[in-house]
Image: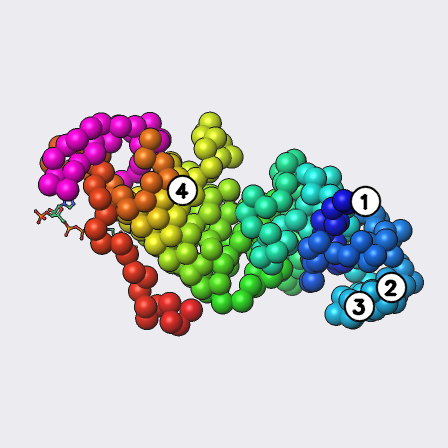
Amino acid sequence: MQNSPFALGLGIGTQNSNGAWLEVYYPRPLLAPDQALVDALQEFASDNALSAADLNEIANRLDANEQGELADVAEQFALSDQPCVLTILTEDEGPQSVPEGYLKLHLLSHRLVKPHGTNLTGLFGILPNVAWTNEGAIDLTDLANRQLKARLEGRILEVSCVDKFPKMTNYVVPAGVRIAHTARVRLGAYLGEGTTVMHEGFINFNAGTDGPGMIEGRISAGVVVGSGSDLGGSASTLGTLSGGNNVVISVGKECLLGANAGTGIPLGDRCTIEAGLFVTAGSRVQVLDNHGNAVEIVKARELAGKSDLLFRRNSQTGAIECLTNKSAIALNEELHANN
Ligand SMILES: CC(C)(COP(=O)(O)OP(=O)(O)OC[C@H]1O[C@@H](n2cnc3c(N)ncnc32)[C@H](O)[C@@H]1OP(=O)(O)O)[C@@H](O)C(=O)NCCC(=O)NCCS
């Protein structure tokens, strides 16, 4: 049996003066589109910008395939002078182009696929480093001229960041989230319903929360945080992009990483790490029984994925200790009722 195609997106974006894509916005990406729809549109799918005539024909074919909302988008694109592109991913392979990479990032932030749910191999090398400004995405080689031009016209070009990934909220704001500082969430982040990200919180691409949850710490690339969990101020989760750590970190349900705490091991459900304690995989941990007596010493990685654990650093001896967590956290009801 043949698999259905992976994804389809009709996007509008920015190209540099050589016609290379800097970014693409896909307002209504489709996961697993019908094969018939893909067959009808395949001839228009490429990295080349579409003409108005192409876009009107795409709109007709979308309508004929019961994709009225996307057909409306195509009609509106046809009236714009911005470059538009049709991207079809027949299989879930690593992205080969900027439009393909952006479509995959949209699938994540639209909650159509979960972190690790799509192949992102090679993404970093494909995405250009871009100046994100109040006048849109600008190629770095054009930036100095654009800054000068703005000054000569009595304006200041506001460069809010120089990065490969834009902020998610300029592309999609998924329902039921609160984000105190939008620059802290990159496109490609997955924010489950009921997620609050406070000013110190950060969520990378291909990472996120099942929601609800309170995120005041950093969710590194590849890390997923379960529902009902709380990452305290400046808490940290080890990523896999650098530093040789190749175990994918996750945090289970109803966990608490205290302020300035961190984890280098996957945590099960209802685990707590004391404020200020960073549990790295190789740390030797003294396991205590219910009477507070030391039972054994294990490496933290041996406790990976286990539930109901409390990690603390003994304030008298300095040893890292692990106890049964008796008081699983409850998210602050008032804060979350007002998400
Ligand atoms: C680890 C933590 C959860 C423990 O809190 P708790 O379960 O309320 O524990 P308590 O402070 O009541 O202490 C229970 C007992 O353990 C002892 N204890 C607690 N931490 C200890 C430590 N680091 N070393 C030795 N003993 C310790 C207490 O002295 C107390 O002893 P007792 O039973 O003899 O009186 C808490 O210290 C913590 O770090 N919370 C994180 C809060 C946070 O950062 N939230 C995010 C805000 S942004």
Residue sitting at x 45%, y 30%: 245
Q: Earlier in the sequence, mark 4 or mark 3?
A: 3
Occupied quadrant, residue 273: top left
Disc 2: which residue: 61
Residue sitting at x 87%, y 57%: 40
Q: Which mark is residue 18?
A: 1
Tag in front: 2 or 1: 2
3D distance between C-alphas at marks 1 and 3: 36 Å
Residue 162 x/y as whole percent: 58, 46
Badge 4 vs badge 3, beta-carbon distance below 8 Å: no
Q: Earlier in the sequence, mark 2 or mark 4?
A: 2
Disc 3: which residue: 66
Disc 4: which residue: 237
Residue 138 x/y as whole percent: 68, 51
Left or right, residue 194 beside residue 70: left
Q: Earlier in the sequence, mark 2 or mark 1?
A: 1
